Image (cartoon, helix red, strand yellow):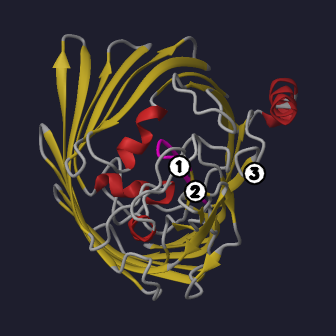
Amino acid sequence: MRKFAFVLFLLVNFPAWASISGQLKSTTDVYPHNFGPPTQTVVPYVSLELNDKYKISRNTRAQWKLYALTNTVSKYSPEKFYGDIPEALVEMRRGTGKLKLGINTLNWGVVDVSSPSDVVNTQAIFHPLRTSKQGAPMVDVSFGPETFNLNLVYIPVQRAPVLPSKDSRWLPRELLIDEKVAELNNNSIIFPKTIEYEYTKMDTQSHALNHNAGAKLSSHIGSWDLQVVHFQGAAPSPKIKPLIRTFFNDLISPVPLTQVNYRIRTTGFGFVWAREKWIWRGESAYSHTISEDPYLPPWSWQSVLEAETNIDLGSSTLTVVMLGYYTQNPKEADNNIGSAYRIFDRTAVLAGRWAYSENLTIMLSGLWETQTNGLFAMGSFDYKLSDHLKWGLTWRNFSAQKPGLLKTYAKDSHGSMELTYFF
């Protein structure tokens, strides 16, 4: 907290920082359900973003972005203090060619919420609703006009994905799915009231973090945007391998967790079709696991279709987004945080953003996961207090009828209050 207070002091008092923009955000999550130690029911986060851009010459520019976050009640890394450099690069242009050198984050997806083609950068996952891409050192080259553009990317050393601290509520504190172990114990493992965890040394397979590379072909023709992508590198989310130990039938806690970083090869297709009233987006991507570990998913094929439209409500506008996801994956989903993307296996999403006035925005969204009859619902509002200050309230609710990720998160339903200062 002292570090963030010091940075804020500099921003307010030193004119030399005037060209730098960013935001300072305070978010406090309040959970009605108490798991007991080591978790907390009130979790305050403070985050800071700083960024700037420079014009070096007519054809050369530079830009950078810093990101820092602290969970002020966590006793363990990485949430106690997490820092990243999402961008620190130089961009050079000549004709229709462009070269970017340095640290960067890329989005190769075209749909909102969750994109199967967006696999270039690894993720920092603190819970399913608080994830961020990590910057990676890369060479990013593109050639050609909008009608036919080729983008090539090479990442010599990728960042390892980041998982929540071991005192996080978002590690499964009451339910751990491991059917083989349960069978060995005659399905009668006795769980403690709250499961605790500890992380072991990472297992990085097939040199997953080295020599990541990919290509994207994109085309803009009239009202259509088309793209084909291919990328080979580290999976954005790792697999978590728990070591289940029992004494007779009692589960021994803390449970060791091994983060498995593995290499995948992803090929995908995407489109955007802009009509007068509707925008249609679609993606389909096939991922093949190169690492040969039977614990890992051997392959997956995910497709998603999205429709977006604006509805006039008097002097205000309601933006409505609808998505449908369909995934084929031969592996059953576990309920560990690294598998949060499996929420979108067979899922429908409906979201609305109502710009009620210049200062007030209301947002409602719902996600229905068909395989476990799981539901995630969220309602929130943001109110602009001034040009530099905004606050908001949010309620997020998880529920499900069958075991899985959403049922695991059911007792993580919570409310949030957020205050954001822009500069």
Q: Residue at x 33, y 49 (%)?
A: 403
Question: Which residue is disc 2 drawn over?
Answer: 251
Earlier residue among tags 1 and 3: 3
Residue 326 position within the rendered picture, expressed as x and y whole percent measured from the top left: 19, 59
Report crowding for label 1: few under 14, some 14 to 19, many 20 or more residues within 10 A (C-alpha).
some
280 up-or-down from 97: above or below: above
8 up-or-down from 264: above or below: above
Q: Which of the labelled discs sits on residue 77, or is there none?
A: 3
Left or right of 375, for residue 193: right
Residue type at mark 3 is Ser
Question: Which residue is disc 1 drawn over?
Answer: 191
State the CA–CA distance, disc 2 to disc 3.
25 Å
Chain part drawn in magenta: 126-134
For the N terminus, give its image quadrant. top right
Report crowding for label 3: few under 14, some 14 to 19, many 20 or more residues within 10 A (C-alpha).
some
156 up-or-down from 111: above or below: below
Residue type at mark 1 is Phe
Q: Is residue 70 magenta?
A: no
Q: Give the label, 2 or 3, closer to the camera.
A: 2
Q: Residue at x 49, y 59 (%)?
A: 338
92 up-or-down from 305: above or below: below
Does residue 350 appear anywhere in the picture? yes
Residue 218 or 302: which is nearer the viewer? 302
State the CA–CA distance, disc 1 to disc 2.
5 Å
Q: Residue at x 83, y 28 (%)?
A: 5
Secondary structure under badge 3? loop
Secondary structure under badge 2? strand
Residue 377 position within the rendered picture, expressed as x and y whole percent measured from the top left: 32, 30
